[in-house]
Amino acid sequence: MKKMKKLFLLAVIAVLAISMVPVSAQNDTTYETGNVIFIHPDGTGLNHWDAGRMYWEGPDGVLEWDQLPYMAVYRGHMLDRLTGTSNGGATVHAFGYKVTGPGSFGQDGGGEEARPINGLSGFEGSIMREAAAAGYPVGVVNDGDAAEPGTAVFLTEAADRNLSNEIVRQMLDGRPGYEGEPLPVVILGGGERFFLPVGTPMCEDEITPDCAVHVDQVSGNGPAREDGRNLVQEAIDLGYVVIRTRDEFDSLMAELEADDTYAPMVLGLFAADDIFNDVPEETLISLGLVDDSMVGTKEGRLIAWGSLPGTLGYNPPSAAEMTEMALIILDRRSEEVGLPFYLVAEVESTDNLPNNANAIGMLRAVKRADAVVGVARDYLADNPDTLILTAADSDGGAPQVFSPAPVDDVMGYVTTSGGNPTGVDESRDFGFPLDGIEGQSTMPFIAAPDAFGNELDFAIGWPGPNDVAGAILSRADGLNAELLNTEFSVQFDNTDIYRMQYVTLFGELLPAPYGQMAPTRGE
């Protein structure tokens, strides 16, 4: 009996001892740290991926994105709306707290109401600014312009997302009150016009820091800075290699391949504004933005990225090519300092082209986003101490596949959708035009063969140009990626993008901030 009491007492002591162990030790929640590659194919819902898979690989095919094994349904609501915005959603990703949708750009709210906030960790700034302050090499890639919120919010804080001149200035100068912050190692995208003063002449015989390479292909706009500063020259003075054309990109890539220790800071500016031309197909044709050498290909002849053949802006680097360059440089910098790197790569065209009901542009953008995932997966194969994480903050344009495509019996062109009957008033039974290969009233798309060898046709329909709260799936692979199927299997909020990245960069899974307002900085 005494022996049994003694055993019971020992058992109680053991239970009490276990209960006094910190929760992190009980649950074995110590995490390895490593690199983070956050890929943001903006506006890309399951409908975009499905349409892209059908067109490029066939309905039974497999994308690079499909091969990211861990996944969770993404919840993208903001403080003041159920649909995410590009600037507000990016702020949530970068700071880990819900913010209002319309004005937030690295702060909560915009204009005079803008409220500087801390990140979820308590750092006075974004997760990327915190990583850079800790000595981590950081970089951004965007096939939009450098001031695009999906990447720029990770480095800058502005009262209005349209203050592009101020936003890119902060990338080099640091945020207001934090001047002299560590510089991002890599900035690759468009937006040359925001780096050069108004009146800068176009480059002719030679490309120099004092001339502009690009004009916007749709608006014709050129250099836009009104403060007289030439940030291209200032970037060079800070130590950046500045590249603005396909030839310069290829030359730098050749240097990187020839010397496996070369790891310069790089600023790439491959368009005046966005690298893509986000207008409807019919507008591209009316502007003469066509490349007849591409007639008959699945990509089509419309120039949705870059400028006309024979110009310096023709065939700009793709998002995947820029990501590959960024990874080479960040990897080498990481080796030098003995710390992980952090890259945010956004494919903005997956949002903007659908926002302009450009169906072939949307399908090509999905292919480009998938190629970015492929580059990241190739890197992960050799560097398992890396997290790949994907997300989109909303569903851009909500494209829908109509198959078989409704077509005109004579011309074979796509026509319109069926309407949405009320059952009461037939005058409200509206349909809407469908898109084919070059927009409305053109030939339907032909999907790649399915498992039976069938090549099925389809058209794309648009309920409207807006971003909506669609079906968004986050996927991941690599270091700590399994958290999507464990910790976040029930709920994966947009604030959890921050938490997933933070645990991999810094080894700490921060408590969820659900229902908590971001703290005002300085209070």
Image: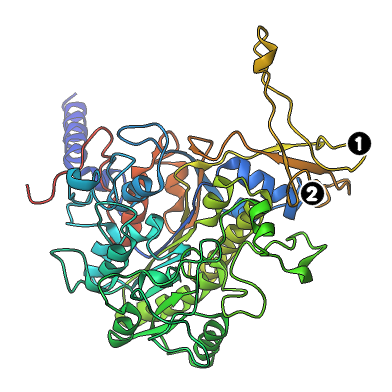
Q: Taking 425 as reference, is 412 above or below it?
A: below
Q: Indicate the position of residue 100 as horizontal and vertical percent values.
A: 29, 39
> Of marks 1 and 2, which one's residue comes earlier in the chain?
1
Q: Amino acid at mark 1?
A: Asp
Q: Residue 347 vs residue 300: left or right?
A: left
Q: Taking 82 as reference, is 391 above or below it?
A: below
Q: Residue at x 67, y 15 (%)?
A: 427
- Residue that protrudes farthest toward the top in the picture: 424
Q: Taking 135 as reference, is 8 above or below it?
A: above
Q: Residue 169 vs residue 435: left or right?
A: left
Q: Categorize mark 1 by other alpha carbons within 10 Å: few (<14), some (14-19), many (20+).
A: few
The dot on residue 90 is none
Which residue is nearer to you in this view: 111 or 8?
A: 111
Q: Amino acid at mark 2?
A: Ala
* Labels 1 & 2 near each other (Cβ < 8 A): no
Q: Residue 162 vs residue 473: left or right?
A: left
Q: Indicate the position of residue 81 as horizontal and vertical percent values.
A: 36, 32
Q: Secondary structure at mark 1?
A: loop
Residues under labels 1 and 2: Cα distance?
A: 20 Å
Q: Indicate the position of residue 165 as horizontal and vertical percent values.
A: 31, 65
Q: Residue at x 24, y 52 (%)?
A: 159
Q: Which residue is mark 2?
A: 447
Q: Secondary structure at mark 2?
A: loop
Q: Taking 178 as reference, is 440 above or below it?
A: above
Q: Residue at x 15, y 44 (%)?
A: 519
- Asked if residue 31 shows in the view, the reply is no
- Asked if residue 60 shows in the view, the reply is yes
Q: Which residue is mark 1?
A: 409
Give the quadrant of the N terminus: top left
Determine which quarter of the picture holds residue 372: bottom right
